[in-house]
Image (tube, helix red, strand yellow):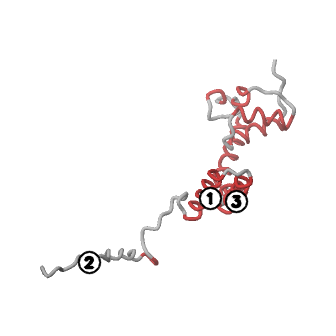
Amino acid sequence: MVAKLSNEVKTFIVQALACFDTPSVVATAVKKEFGLDISRQLAESHDPTKRTGRDLAKRWKALFEETRKAFLEDTAAIGISHRSVRLRALQRMAAKAEDMGNMQLATQILRQAGEEMGGALTNRRELTGKDGKDLPAAPAPVNIFQLPDNGRG
């Protein structure tokens, strides 16, 4: 027999699921936060997008929808969504890799930071020049070697 969950615990579960935490992650968080052992299945039963949550009370469905909407609209609250946060984390990782003597890993991290700064990890690409004008044409190759004339020309 499963003990009845308090509204505080149910709110926690519904909001965590609305923020795309998996039922396993939610069950672990409930244990840590409230000291309660709940199953993954019990956590999942609070997700109205799942079959097991189809009979969830309207109150919890509404909370789920509100939380999900706010979560999807507010990426500013997620630190890793900001380039400067990612770069600082990469800087810490690169320094640690160097301290450990792992130059291959440090090089990979530095490459990733360079890609981050160069916009390679974004959806934006510059396909035009400044102010929307055409990109400058590449200069024609110059032949720096000249064949001797040998009087045949």
Label 2, secondary structure: give it. Answer: loop
Residue 78 makes an appearance in the image: no
The residue carrying pointer 1 sits among few (fewer than 14), some (14 to 19) or many (20 or more) residues within 10 Å by Cα, namely some
Residue 48 lies, in percent from the top left, at: 65, 34
Relative placement, left or right, of 102 versus 149 is: right
**Residue 114 in picture, x, y percent from top left:** 58, 62
Quote the CA–CA distance across marks 2 and 3: 49 Å
Callout 3: SS: helix
Q: Quadrant of the N terminus?
A: top right
State which tag comes first along the sequence, 1 or 2.
Answer: 1
State the quadrant of the C terminus: bottom left
Q: What's the residue type where badge 2 is placed?
A: Gln
Provide the residue designation for mark 2.
Answer: 146
Query: Is residue 128 left or right of 4 when viewed as pictured?
Result: left
At label 3, which amino acid type do we have? Gln
Residue sitting at x 40%, y 77%: 133
Quarter assignment of residue 52: top right
CA gap, disc 3 to disc 1?
A: 8 Å
In front: label 2 or label 3: 2
Q: Amino acid at mark 1?
A: Leu
Q: Position of residue 87 (x, y in %)?
A: 67, 60
**In front: 114, or 135?**
114
Which percent across, then down, holds residue 148? 22, 78
Question: Marks 1 and 2, Cα distance to the nearest angstrom?
Answer: 42 Å
Q: Nearer the viewer, residue 61 or 80?
A: 80
Question: Which dot marks residue 91?
Answer: 3
Q: Is residue 94 above or below residue 142?
A: above
Q: Mark 1 — residue?
A: 110
**Tag 2: Cα neighbours inside 10 Å, few (<14), some, or many (≥20)?**
few
